[in-house]
Image (tube, rainbow, N blue to C red):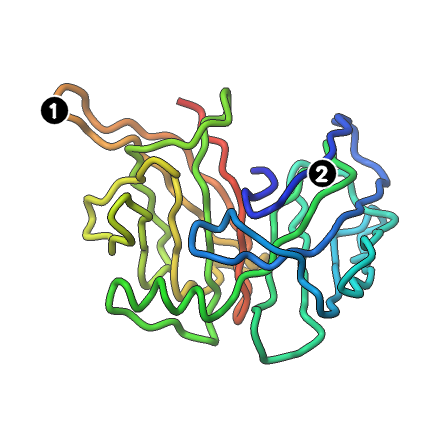
Amino acid sequence: MGTGPGSAGSSGNPDADAGTGTLQGNVLLLTDDSFVHASLYTSGATVTADGASGSPVTANWDGADPFSLEGVARVATNWVSVNPALVGGDPLPTYQAVQTNRVTKVDLALVSSAMLDGIFNAVASLRSPNSGQVVLFFHSASTGAPLAGLHVTMAKAQVVMYATNNGWLLDDGAAITGQDGLVVFGNVEPANSNGTQSVTVTRAATASTPAVPAGEFSVKVVQGAVSIATVGVQL
């Protein structure tokens, strides 16, 4: 997994070895249901990441100056969270998969509950405020390009919504990813004590080719929060 498309940018620092690192950046508010366009989040928040010592490390975002986290665990997937200072309001607490073994600077995203509700409304469903919500982009692991034509499943998701050229499509068991490779899993419950849930990816069958398994990936799920990530699929 990697930093989600909701981030405005990142700075690479390849380093495959685990250890202590730093992470700096801004906090952005995603502004539409593409989960790409964003503006600076001008209110306060707390940023938290897994630390190299085994304990979380935190930093404050003041709405203007870049946050700076010290003692960050350098790992392939560090679920960095942003918790708005205003509890129970909008936006929602948001977790983002960050490759802290490869980047030292990254802009973190916050997801609006109103925007999510608009997606649920588009498929005649309702968001549960007590469940987790998961936003995933499926990209090629080799080229980084979005992958169309995938069918994805998550056992504990009550609803699965695919972004298409014509809006959002509720999965009927045969839906496939569109040109952006974007899927929202709604009203998800954590699957185990680690707070993760497995996503199974299949390249859908076509008129000339059978369906092909394309991997299984673990995603963090937190009740009352949103998780966002890019999943690199090897095809």
131 to the left or right of 40: left
Q: How many tags in the picture?
A: 2
Q: Is residue 229 left or right of residue 119?
A: right
In percent of width and height, residue 157 lies at 36, 59
106 above or below 155? above
Label 2 CA crowd tier, 10 Å (few <14, some 14–19, many 20+): many
What percent of the width, then of the height, locates residue 9?
A: 66, 39
* Among the two numbered marks 2 and 1 on one chain, the one whose residue lies closer to the N terminus: 2
Mark seen at residue 154: none
Question: Which residue is at 46% across, 62% downward?
Answer: 133
The residue that appears at 67% across and 78% down in the rendered structure is 86
Q: What residue type is labelled 1?
A: Ala
Instruction: Measuring from the top left, give residue 153's x and y in whole percent.
Output: 33, 47
- The image's mark for residue 75 is 2
CA distance separating discs 2 and 1: 41 Å
The residue identified by callout 1 is 207
Labels 2 and 1 touching (C-beta < 8 A)? no
**Where's the N terminus, which quadrant?**
top right
**Drawn side of residue 125 relative to residue 145, left or right:** left
Mark 1 residue element: loop
In which quadrant of the rendered image does the C terminus lie? top left
191 and 89: which one is in front?
89
Is residue 67 positioned above or below 24 on the image?
Answer: below
* Foreground: disc 2 or disc 1: 1
Residue 187 rendering spot, x and y as whole percentages:
40, 66
